[in-house]
Image (cartoon, grey):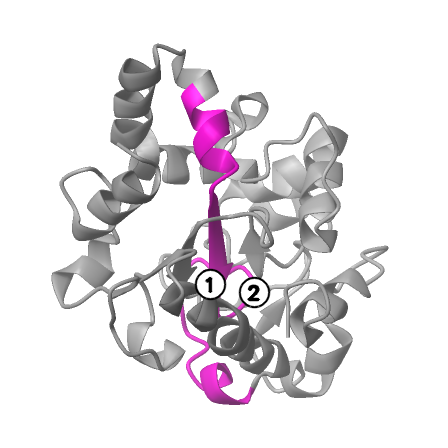
């Protein structure tokens, strides 16, 4: 089974993304049992009782899901995570910046345009977004090395990396803190994501086409380490570093030819 016909892709391509709550149809029955928040703007969120609460573990279904970022068909490095985080900037980006929202939906549908940076959060157009801050901090040292090696600008290096890297989330819904443990085994979209990794990515890793790096929720991915499948351990899973000094960063650099 390939990337384009897998149930995971059919699931997210089939979502209308017209109005919240933004929940995959397959997940709706299960999600009714969870702690959810549905805000329709930055203003609604910042005036809500959960704004600023450090231990908020609710899933924010007023935001678009983020099961993956990057071109799933063309990437050569796949980073496995747990679920997308949450910051006020997520609400601002989706409800106030049309260009970002449209790029986000194209990513979900895997329908990129010529101007897109496939890994959305390495696109300098969105350097103000908290997602860019998070991912750029992980890839900055690799981008600097790549820019020096190829004698290109930092922005050009980020664009190159953005075409080679994809991230996958086991739970696709945003939360400030993770508290959706029961969903890891029973949420249909999580099951489809796990199946996608085992049915599509593992065979590609075994044939040396790609590198898979599990950084968060490692045990829940059900993978066995191998030459091209790296599983983070211990403190690695808390920091999830991908700098050149980390095990994952070194694997990425190898795949990029650094």
Q: Which residue is mark 1?
A: 83
Question: Dot 2, how many residues are within 10 Å of its Cα: few (below 14), some (14-19), or many (20+)?
Answer: many
Q: How far across and how far down the image is residue 161, in percent? A: 44, 34
Q: Residue at x 56, y 65 (%)?
A: 172
Say left or right for 101 vs 48.
Answer: right
The image quadrant that residue 115 belongs to is top right
Q: Residue at x 30, y 35 (%)?
A: 257
Residue sitting nearer the eye, 110 or 174: 110
- Labels 2 & 1 near each other (Cβ < 8 A): yes
Question: Dot 1, how many residues are within 10 Å of its Cα: few (below 14), some (14-19), or many (20+)?
Answer: many
The image quadrant that residue 191 belongs to is bottom right
Query: Does any portion of residue 84 appear in the rendered image?
Result: no
Outermost residue, front direction?
207
Q: Residue at x 64, y 64 (%)?
A: 3
Q: Relative to 199, say whether 30 is above or below.
A: below
Residue 166 colored in magenta in the image: yes
Q: Which residues are magenta?
A: 157-186
Q: How far across and how far down the image is residue 97, in percent? A: 71, 30
Q: How far across and how far down the image is residue 184, in percent? A: 46, 82
Which comes sooner in the sequence, label 2 or label 1?
1
Query: Does any portion of residue 48 appear in the rendered image?
Result: yes
Q: Which residue is mark 2?
A: 172
Q: Relative to 75, say whether 169 is above or below.
A: below
Residue 120 colored in magenta in the image: no
Say left or right for 177 vs 71.
Answer: left
Residue sitting nearer the eye, 103 or 17: 103
């Amino acid at each position: 089974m390939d990337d384009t016909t897998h149930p995971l892709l059919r699931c997210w391509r089939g979502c209308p993304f017209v109005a919240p709550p933004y929940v995959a149809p397959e997940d709706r029955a299960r999600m009714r049992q969870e702690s959810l928040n549905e805000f329709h703007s930055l203003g609604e969120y910042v005036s809500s009782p959960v704004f600023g609460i450090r231990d908020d573990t609710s899933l924010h279904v007023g935001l678009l899901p983020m099961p993956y970022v990057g071109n799933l068909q063309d990437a050569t490095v796949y980073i496995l995570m747990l679920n997308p985080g949450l910051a006020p900037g997520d609400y601002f980006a989706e409800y106030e910046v049309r260009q970002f929202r449209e790029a986000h939906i194209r990513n979900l549908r895997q329908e990129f345009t010529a101007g897109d940076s496939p890994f959305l959060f390495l696109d300098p157009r969105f350097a103000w977004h908290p997602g860019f801050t998070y991912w750029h901090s992980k890839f900055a040292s690799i981008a600097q090395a790549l820019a020096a090696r190829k004698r290109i600008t930092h922005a050009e290096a980020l664009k190159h990396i953005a075409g080679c890297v994809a991230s996958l989330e086991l739970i696709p819904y945003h939360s400030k803190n993770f508290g959706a443990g029961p969903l890891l085994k029973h949420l249909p979209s999580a099951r489809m994501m796990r199946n996608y990794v085992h049915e599509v990515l593992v065979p590609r890793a075994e044939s040396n086409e790609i590198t898979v790096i599990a950084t968060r929720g490692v045990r829940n991915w059900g993978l066995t380490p191998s030459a091209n499948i790296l599983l983070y351990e211990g403190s690695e899973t808390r920091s999830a570093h991908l700098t050149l000094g980390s095990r994952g960063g070194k694997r990425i650099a190898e795949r990029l030819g650094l």
